[in-house]
């Protein structure tokens, strides 16, 4: 009922806007608007504010180069305040009121799920820059962060090969990303012959601060004489007390290494990293990547923020790639029209910061290298492993029976995000 | 298998070394060899260095493990580097001679990873068994105990012959037992080793015995399994003690967070939603104090918390005072408006801090006396938790004394029990209200100093504790300090006993459900106040 009411309201609203269109058309032609949908207050502000700044920097740099299609870009910043339903409202505002050409935004999966219907209904473009659980492919969304096969699986492979790990603790925060990722990892580990009793799965609430019991459980789990590692999908603030407790209980990386998927340079900034040296993280970018593009990027970032100590991180690189892809696609299409850009952007390749090119795949995920880094005493990562070549993001995991038979290809004539290859029909899981 | 690989690598690497360096046993050239090659080649380089058996190689290996080994790009010489300003001081790894300062760009780090660190740990163990410092000898024996590298058996036997200190001897004997389990000694030797490990250190020995039992069979396996059973029995007992400790520790955190609220909400009846932000202000005060000490007086770092305590009390206390004078005093007797107004204040404070300090977490360091852990008869007590328990009890006692033994405390109790009567006795009730609120807020501030040691210092710090604080005060009984103490410890221990069975998420839910049911039965909490005040 409320949905109906909302739709009715938005139709009325759209009509009203359409009426005003004729008058604002002349103004709208001056600039191309780009929407930024990141929380600037609330729990997620800690991570998302940086991404807003990164986007403002990218837009400013593009304008210095002469803008896009001869027009200047204009950033429209809204604050969804870490409130998931508000994300949908703000997305509607960006598309309906501000008429933005593309939106860059969201962090948590739940906020992304909340805006999906809005982007489908109003036909907008969303660039989503954060590593996520996969199992999704939408026509209007471009996933520039890592899918599980671009982060989680290679990290586990590294531990299997280099640390000869036999027992696994999958520890995560209790929400959709860790649960789905751990489901995929569990299936993957079992396919590698790991027994049930050698996998321990543990979930904790958001912002969990008392890790004594869990860390001592991990310690006990690791004292069975088999090499043990922790795969951590612990998100946000809870990481700091978790690592502190590890340090205090004397678990060093040489005994039980922890590989994390949500801990980057930004998160380490609030930590004394001395006891954490050697713990691992898997990303597609580290600030310590030694390339010319990255050096320029870091320099521009420090100049833009006016702070010598600001760090860069993986989701920032994802926005860098996503923004440049969009710019290139718009230039190729000669218009910011959403349908044309969606068709044109597939196959577009732009330089990433780790010294290669990332390309947009037909499933709206991108190709990236996977890097494994060890935490250093200065809060940076030292890259200890790098995949040969690029890994293409896989929307539907090959390790979950339901998803293995699905493929995604948004090119015509297939134009389907969840094509079932067994039944040859579009519309599997998640439709 | 591992030894076979090591052997093969050594076979491969030896001819390489022979061709490049004439004297391949010279430690200096072996150290310099680490300037080239990738992580995989480095394992063989470390083995080669360890094979010299020369203790002089230890500083270089230790530096490599700590990530402080660098090579000069110009001539590929390897040095230990110490940061001094923007440059590095290069130190010769063998002679410890400082050869001067070099800019960052002219040196490059010798890379290392976890498996190399493990390797280094085990070779350093063997190399330092004869060190003159007994502490280093014990550490060496302990690393060998953990790694159980059969190649160190000879070195251990040599060290045992001349070892006199009894504590070092027993550590070495344990290490020897661990090595024997991994070597091809006789069954009788192995069984003797198992008994030794079982008697020695149960928890530490468990991984060794488990691994051994899985690989062996017959009488030795039976002996190992028996020892494992014995150790596990002891551990099960210890675990109960450990859980109780964790519960007390969680309870002390709850107590700290709630004790200020016990004054403002419990005694005054003000629903102060900004209580958490007072805690946050205390934590940020600690951060500022530490920053000043770091930049100006690094020697004082261990005293930073002691300095932060009075400041945090003043900052949060005065903030509370201002709040009471400007907002809350107009809202007495209107709980809903108080709730909304203080919630608004909490948002303002959060955003102010976010604007001043930024939204990222701030690093608050642990002083050395709050890092690490103490071993107490098989229990591990982490230092920061132990100090927080002590501190929480101290704050509780101090507040108790203030309330019961001072003139101010007397006036405060008089005002809460019967405002009109107190007023007619000449007590300036508005003044007492303001000071009481300031006291409650100040205590929240010093709680913030303690919590900065275990939690994130971010603008959201307070929000994480506000619900728990109210839970404790309501459960313990509004207006009763003892109730807050007992309530906090009960909830802490109950939570920790539920966690292993139910998981952290469900444990929290169960506690909430329990409190709801409890409040139905006893609406005034554990220790209900009786008398006139209740009706007021």
Image: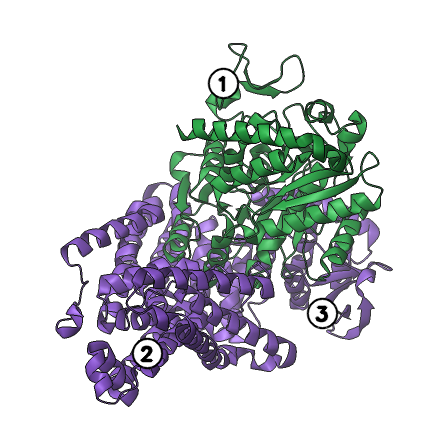
Quickly name the residue at label 2: B433
Q: Kindly indicate whether the residues beneath marks 2 and 1 are on one polypeptide chain.
A: no
> B165 or B463, which is in the foreground?
B463
Number of residues whose C-alpha sits closer than 10 Å to that of mark 1, classed few (under 14), some (14–19) or many (20 or more):
some
What distance separates the C-alpha of mark 3 from that of mark 2?
57 Å
Secondary structure of the residue carrying numbered label 2: helix
Give coordinates of residue B308: x percent, y percent.
49, 78
Quickly name the residue at label 1: A428
- Residue visible at 62% across and 34% down in the picture: A95
Find residue B279 and report its image quarter: bottom left
Q: Do tag 3 and tag 1 residues touch (Cβ < 8 Å)? A: no
> A7 or A350, which is in the foreground?
A7
Q: Nearer the viewer, mark 3 or mark 1?
A: 1
Q: Nearer the viewer, mark 3 or mark 2?
A: 2
Q: Kindly indicate whether the residues beneath marks 3 and 2 are on one polypeptide chain.
A: yes
- Residue visible at 51% across and 81% down in the picture: B303
Q: Quadrant of the N terminus of chain B?
A: top right
- Image mark 3: chain: B
What distance separates the C-alpha of mark 2 from that of mark 1?
65 Å
């Amino acid at each position: 009922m409320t949905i109906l009411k909302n739709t009715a309201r938005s139709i009325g609203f759209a009509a009203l806007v359409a009426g005003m269109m004729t008058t604002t058309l002349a103004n709208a032609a001056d600039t191309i608007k780009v929407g930024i949908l990141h929380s600037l207050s609330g729990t997620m502000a800690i991570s998302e504010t940086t991404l807003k700044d990164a986007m403002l920097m990218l837009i400013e740099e593009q304008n210095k180069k002469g803008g896009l299609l001869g027009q200047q870009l204009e950033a429209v910043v809204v604050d969804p305040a870490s409130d998931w339903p508000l994300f949908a409202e703000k997305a509607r505002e960006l598309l309906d009121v501000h008429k933005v050409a593309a939106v860059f935004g969201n962090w948590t999966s739940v906020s992304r799920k909340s805006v999906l219907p809005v982007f489908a209904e109003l036909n907008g473009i969303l660039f989503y820059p954060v590593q996520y659980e996969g199992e999704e492919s939408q026509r209007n969304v471009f996933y520039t962060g890592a899918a599980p096969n671009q982060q989680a699986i290679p990290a586990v492979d590294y531990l299997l090969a280099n640390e000869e790990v036999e027992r696994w603790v999958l520890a995560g925060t209790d929400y959709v990303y860790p649960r789905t990722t751990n489901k995929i990892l569990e299936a993957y580990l079992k396919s590698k012959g790991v027994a049930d009793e050698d996998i321990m799965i543990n979930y904790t609430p958001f912002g969990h601060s008392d890790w004594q019991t869990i860390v001592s459980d991990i310690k006990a789990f690791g004292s069975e004489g088999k090499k043990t590692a922790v795969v951590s999908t612990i998100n946000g603030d809870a990481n700091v007390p978790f690592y502190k407790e590890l340090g205090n209980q004397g678990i060093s990386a040489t005994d039980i290494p922890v590989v994390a998927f949500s801990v980057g340079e930004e998160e380490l900034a609030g930590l004394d990293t001395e006891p954490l040296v050697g713990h691992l993280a898997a990303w597609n970018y580290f600030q310590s990547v030694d390339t010319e593009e990255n050096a320029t990027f870091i320099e521009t970032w420090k100049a833009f923020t006016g702070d010598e100590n600001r760090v860069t991180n993986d989701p920032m690189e994802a926005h860098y790639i996503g923004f440049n892809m969009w710019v290139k696609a718009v230039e190729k299409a000669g218009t910011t029209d959403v349908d044309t850009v969606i068709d044109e952007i597939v196959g577009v390749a732009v330089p990433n910061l780790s010294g290669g090119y990332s390309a947009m795949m037909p499933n709206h995920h991108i190709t990236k290298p996977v890097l494994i880094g060890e935490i250093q005493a200065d809060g940076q990562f030292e890259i200890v492993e790098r995949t040969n070549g690029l890994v293409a993001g896989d929307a539907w995991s090959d390790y979950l029976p339901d998803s293995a038979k699905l493929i995604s290809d948004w090119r015509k004539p297939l134009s389907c995000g969840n094509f079932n290859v067994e039944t040859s029909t579009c519309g599997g899981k998640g439709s | 298998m591992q030894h076979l690989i090591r052997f093969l690598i050594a076979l491969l690497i030896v001819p390489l070394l022979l061709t490049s360096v004439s004297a391949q046993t010279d430690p200096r050239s072996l150290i310099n060899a680490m300037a080239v090659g990738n992580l995989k080649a480095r394992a063989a380089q470390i083995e080669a260095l360890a094979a010299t058996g020369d203790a002089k190689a230890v500083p270089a290996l230790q530096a490599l493990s700590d990530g402080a080994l660098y090579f000069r790009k110009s001539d590929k010489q390897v040095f230990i580097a110490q940061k001094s300003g923007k440059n590095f001081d290069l130190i010769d790894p063998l002679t410890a001679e400082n050869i001067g300062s070099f800019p960052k760009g002219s040196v490059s780090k010798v890379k290392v990873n976890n498996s190399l660190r493990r390797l280094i740990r085990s070779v350093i163990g063997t190399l330092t068994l004869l060190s003159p410092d007994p502490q280093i000898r014990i550490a060496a024996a302990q690393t060998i105990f953990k790694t159980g590298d059969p190649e160190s058996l000879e070195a251990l036997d040599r060290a045992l012959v001349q070892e006199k200190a009894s504590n070092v001897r027993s550590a070495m004997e344990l290490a020897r037992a661990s090595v024997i389990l991994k070597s091809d000694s006789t069954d009788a030797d192995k069984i003797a080793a198992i008994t030794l490990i079982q008697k020695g250190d149960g928890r530490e020995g468990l991984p060794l015995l488990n691994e051994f039992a899985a690989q062996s069979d017959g009488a030795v396996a039976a002996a190992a399994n028996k020892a494992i059973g014995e150790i596990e029995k002891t551990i099960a007992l210890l675990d109960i003690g450990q859980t109780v400790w964790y519960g007390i520790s969680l309870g002390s955190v709850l107590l700290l967070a709630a004790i200020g609220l016990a004054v403002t909400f419990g005694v005054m009846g003000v629903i102060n939603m900004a209580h958490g932000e007072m805690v946050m202000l205390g934590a940020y005060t600690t951060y500022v104090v530490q920053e000043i000490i770091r930049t100006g007086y690094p020697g004082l770092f261990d005293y930073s918390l002691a300095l932060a305590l009075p400041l945090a009390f003043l900052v949060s206390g005065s903030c509370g005072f201002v709040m009471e004078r400007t907002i809350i005093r107009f809202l007495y007797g209107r709980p809903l408006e108080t709730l909304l107004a203080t919630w608004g204040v909490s948002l303002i404070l959060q955003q102010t801090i976010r604007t001043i300090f930024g939204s990222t977490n701030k690093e608050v360091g642990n002083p050395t006396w709050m890092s690490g852990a103490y071993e107490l008869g098989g229990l591990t007590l982490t230092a920061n938790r132990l100090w927080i328990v002590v501190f929480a009890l101290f704050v509780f006692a101090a507040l108790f004394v203030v309330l019961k033994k001072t003139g101010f405390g007397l006036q405060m109790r008089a005002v809460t029990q019967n405002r009109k009567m107190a007023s007619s006795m000449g007590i300036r009730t508005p003044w007492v209200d303001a000071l009481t609120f300031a006291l409650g807020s100040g205590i929240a501030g010093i709680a913030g100093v303690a919590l900065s040691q275990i939690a994130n210092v971010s603008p959201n710090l307070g929000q994480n504790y506000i619900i728990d604080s109210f839970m404790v005060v309501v459960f313990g009984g509004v207006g009763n300090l003892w109730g807050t103490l007992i309530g906090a410890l009960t909830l802490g221990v109950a939570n920790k006993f539920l966690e292993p069975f139910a998981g952290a998420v469900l444990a929290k839910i169960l506690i909430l459900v329990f409190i709801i049911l409890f409040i139905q039965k006893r609406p005034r909490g554990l220790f209900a106040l009786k008398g006139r005040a209740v009706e007021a």
